[in-house]
Image (cartoon, coloured by chain):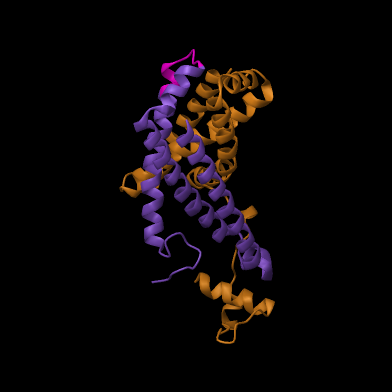
Amino acid sequence: MVTNATSFSRSGLSDWIIQRFSAVILAAYTLFILAVLGATPELDYESWRAVFSNNPVRLFSIISLFALCGHTWVGMWTVGTDYLTGRQLGGNGTFIRLIYQSFCVLLIAVYLLWGIQIFWGS
Amino acid sequence: MADAVTLSVDCAHKYIPYATVCYHVKDTRPVNLDLTTFKFPLPAITSILHRISGVALFFGIGVVLYLLQLSLESEAGFEQVTELFRATPAKLVVWLILTGLLYHLIAGIKHLLMDWGLGESREGALRGAQVTLILSLAATVLSWGMIW
């Protein structure tokens, strides 16, 4: 079995499962938010805030946030290891990919902490 | 196969780890990796759009989190977001994000169905790609109507 030091779970099969599992959670959350928006055409601040201060919704939001982080990492990793390679970019490919992956990790960390702050605080 | 090609490229660039074996024999094989000369079938186009929308959404999340935070922060913040949504540039950005999200969602559901074993034949893959594009087009128009 080939393992890769930068893959999410060091295993392609686990990455595959994480991507699918998180996809289902994110699909459910997306449909939920769209349903909320669709059900209340004249949305005001109080009702909008009430949606996110509800405890089950808060839980759903934060679980979806974690799913989002796993999902984006596996996705961005896959794209990076497909296109930012030695074959496509020459000798600097691995270095460029490492910079790209570091940027992705940092942005995902920002999204995670920022998102927790939003959902926990609301 | 891929390893052999990669190795030969590495050899050409002289980035050769001491333990790497160079398969010079493989260098003479005709390899067409020029993507511009490929004819892409419909499932390939829906697949690459899935990737492009995914990468775009990665950055769109920042915009969504910003708007969400502002709208939940205070009454004034909520009004600010409502005000923003009246202007065309913000509408366009939100519409693009929504379009990307709905496309990624629909293509993702197709992907999961194919993982399940549905529509894996040549015809099935084509039909799946067609349905994905039609549903996405409908979702794009719907989200346009929702925002404007």
Q: Is residue A59 above or below residue B91?
A: below
Which chain has been coloured orange in this picture? B
Q: Residue at x 63, y 76 (%)?
A: B10
Please state which of residues A37 and A115 is positioned toward the viewer in this rendering. A115
**What colour has chain A?**
purple
Q: In the displayed structure, does residue A29 sit left or right of residue B82?
A: left
What x and y, as percent, mark residue A68?
A: 46, 44
Please state which of residues A77 and B79 is positioned toward the viewer in this rendering. B79
Q: Is residue A121 above or below residue A18?
A: above
Q: Residue at x 48, y 34 (%)?
A: A121
What x and y, as percent, mark residue A77?
A: 52, 56
Q: Is residue A44 above or below residue A29?
A: above
What x and y, as percent, mark residue B79?
A: 60, 18
Q: Residue at x 39, y 55 (%)?
A: A16
Q: Residue at x 68, y 26 (%)?
A: B89
Give the magenta range. A36-44
Q: Is residue B123 something that shows in the picture?
A: no
> Considering the image in quadrants, where does the C terminus of chain B appear?
top right
Please state which of residues B96 and A108 is positioned toward the viewer in this rendering. A108
Residue B111 lies in quadrant: top left
What x and y, as percent, mark residue B101?
A: 51, 35
Q: Residue furthest top?
A: A42
